[in-house]
Image (cartoon, rainbow, N blue to C red):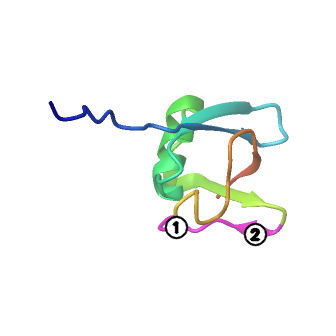
Amino acid sequence: MPKKITPQYNLVEIEVNDRLGKKVRVKCSPQDTIGDFKKLVAAQIGTDPKKIVLKKWYKEFKDHITLDDYELHNGMNVELYYR
């Protein structure tokens, strides 16, 4: 009998803080792009994803690159700015 393969879903939780009082934790996949992650953040805070800018220090994250490529792991903080 063949061995049953179960899919592995490793979600990470990243905290997003705008330093004006909004702080949300978003669960996502490391393979999600920054653009996908912005949509998840926008759904939680009620803002248009096109108006969201995500940064870490002075590095602005580009929409087409994945969270894993930016080495954003579980429990990390990201700064939220608005356009």
Q: Residue at x 68, y 48 (%)?
A: 73
Q: Position of residue 20 (x, y in %)?
A: 83, 37
Position of residue 65 relative to residue 21, above or below, is below
Q: Residue at x 52, y 61 (%)?
A: 66
Mark 2 residue type: Lys
Residue drawn at the location 51% of the way across and 39% of the way down: 10
User: Dot 2 surroundings within 10 Å: few (below 14), some, or many (20 or more)?
Assistant: few
State which region is magenta.
58-64
Q: Nearer the viewer, residue 42 or 26?
A: 26
Percent position (x, y) of residue 67?
A: 58, 57
| Residue, disc 1 | 65
Q: Amino acid at mark 1?
A: Ile
* Closer to the camera in the image, 20 or 62: 62
Q: Give the CA separation, mark 1 to mark 2.
A: 13 Å
* Mark 1–mark 2 CB contact (< 8 Å): no
Q: Which mark is residue 42?
A: none
Q: Is residue 31 left or right of residue 6?
A: right
Identify the residue shown where x is 15% and y is 30%. 1
Q: Position of residue 72 (x, y in %)?
A: 67, 54
Q: Is residue 48 magenta?
A: no
Residue identified by numbered label 2: 59
Q: Quadrant of the C terminus?
A: bottom right
Occupied quadrant, residue 5: top left
Residue furthest toward the left? 1
Give the main secondary structure, helix, strand or loop, of the magenta stretch.
loop
